[in-house]
Image (cartoon, helix red, strand yellow):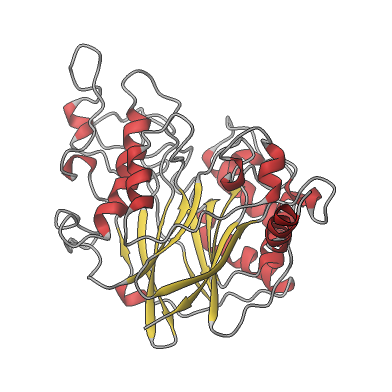
């Protein structure tokens, strides 16, 4: 190993060490923690039992929960988005239990947001016999399945939170409508006219940091697979990602309306961080890659390409391995700060190499998650 390799290895390895952030540095992180009901129960159980399973796993912490809490406590993010954290009837209780577990490990998040999502919400098309996950706005076995949770050490400007759960897919200009091979629409008109774009939701959550605001733009687009030749999930994933690309541009965002019927996107010169499991790689996989490429290549976005040595070890012959964020060998999880008003200090992916300290925390989905925690440290600039 030459000196160049030693330096690179040292830098990457340092991302695994617990750190205390400098006073002027804020760590933003995203983590698809796979804390969803089907990890714990048979999907044939009742909706109530499915919803209660995460609550049970948090009440008497399952080892997976303990490992996830440990990972977060090691990286100590100031603001973190958790994907696949069930909402629903136990949503508030789950949030409180999870926050208490984090607090017991030295992390206090006094501010949080956990809004409704489209998973498991039935499309109202007159079919009274329909039950989740069939005929739903987003795939899920109950309303709130695969939900999202944002935790913050900094105050949230709750008055100016914008959610886009109800935005209809058809209202996006040039939406990629799924089509049959014969050229007819895959969705019936009654469904297409009511189908929402977000498989979960899109959230704009302003965080107050000193005298400035940073907009956390959170989402979890559908995986671009599990469909047919109509590519309904691939097209939806594309347009869910495209939503943020339009939202951060004043000219392209005029069509967007939020759940309070207010139109438009971010104002010019707004600080933002796009976060979440976007389920798309710019170089690999089955997604329609132009959406994520366009987002990453936008001059308003600062893509630091967080890396890890564990990812390289997981796919040693893969030229894109260093940026992978999931054990199934792809980059799909993102923390993307704005170029305006935010300076990136460092970034990384929590992915120890085999045999290293903390390796036992990330072995597989049952150990913690098949996704890894991604983080970016930023300073606010004027």
Whole-percent x and y of residue 153?
54, 77
Say which quarter of the image contains residue 256: bottom left
Q: Residue furthest bottom?
A: 211
Determine whether 294 is above or below 24 in the image.
above
Q: Residue furthest front?
A: 2
Determine whether 288 is above or below 253 in the image.
above
Give the quarter of the figure containing the C terminus: bottom left
Name the residue nearer the viewer: 3 or 92.
3
Residue at 36%, 36% (x, y): give it: 136
Q: Is residue 344 left or right of residue 106?
A: left
Say which quarter of the image contains residue 259: bottom left
Whole-percent x and y of residue 204?
35, 64
Determine whether 273 is above or below 57 in the image.
below
Whole-percent x and y of residue 128?
31, 30
Q: Is residue 65 left or right of residue 204?
A: right
Name the residue nearer the viewer: 352 or 171.
352
- Residue 380 appears in view: yes
Whole-percent x and y of residue 240?
33, 45
Total labels: the figure holds 0
Q: Residue furthest right?
A: 355
Say which quarter of the image contains residue 320: top right
Q: Is residue 224 left or right of residue 258?
A: right
Residue at 66%, 44% (x, y): give it: 311
- Residue 198 appears in view: no
Residue at 38%, 51% (x, y): give it: 296
């Amino acid at each position: 190993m030459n000196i160049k390799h030693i330096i690179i290895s040292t830098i990457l390895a340092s991302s695994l060490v617990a750190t205390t952030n400098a006073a002027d540095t804020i760590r933003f992180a995203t983590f698809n923690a796979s804390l969803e009901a089907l990890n714990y129960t048979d999907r044939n159980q009742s909706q109530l039992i499915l919803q209660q399973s995460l609550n049970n796993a948090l009440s008497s912490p399952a080892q997976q929960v303990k490992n996830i809490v440990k990972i977060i406590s090691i990286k100590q993010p100031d603001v973190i988005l958790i994907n696949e954290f069930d909402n629903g009837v136990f949503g508030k209780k789950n949030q409180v239990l999870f926050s208490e577990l984090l607090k017991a490990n030295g992390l206090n998040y006094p501010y949080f947001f956990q809004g409704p999502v489209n998973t498991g919400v039935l499309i109202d098309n007159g079919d009274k016999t329909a039950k989740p996950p069939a005929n739903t706005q987003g795939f899920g076995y109950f309303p709130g399945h695969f939900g999202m949770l944002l935790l913050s050490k900094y105050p949230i400007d709750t008055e100016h939170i914008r959610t886009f759960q109800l935005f209809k897919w058809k209202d996006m200009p040039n939406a990629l409508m799924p089509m049959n091979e014969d050229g007819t629409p895959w969705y019936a008109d009654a469904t297409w006219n009511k189908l929402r774009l977000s498989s979960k939701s899109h959230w704009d959550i302003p965080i107050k940091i000193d005298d400035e605001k940073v907009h956390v733009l959170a989402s979890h687009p559908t995986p671009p697979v599990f469909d047919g030749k109509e590519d309904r999930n691939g097209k939806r994933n594309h347009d869910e990602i495209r939503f943020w690309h339009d939202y951060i541009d004043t000219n392209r965002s005029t069509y967007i309306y939020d759940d309070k019927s207010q139109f438009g996107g971010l104002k010019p010169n707004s600080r933002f961080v796009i976060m979440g499991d976007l389920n798309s790689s710019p170089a690999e996989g089955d997604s329609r890659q132009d959406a994520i490429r366009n987002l990453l290549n936008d001059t308003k976005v600062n893509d630091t390409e967080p890396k890890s040595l564990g990812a390289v070890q997981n796919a040693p012959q893969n030229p894109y391995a260093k940026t992978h964020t999931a054990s199934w060998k792809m980059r799909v999880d993102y923390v993307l700060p704005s170029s305006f008003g935010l300076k990136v200090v460092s970034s990384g992916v929590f992915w120890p190499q085999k045999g290293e300290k903390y390796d036992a925390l990330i072995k597989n989905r049952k150990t913690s998650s098949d996704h890894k925690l991604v983080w970016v440290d930023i300073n606010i600039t004027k």
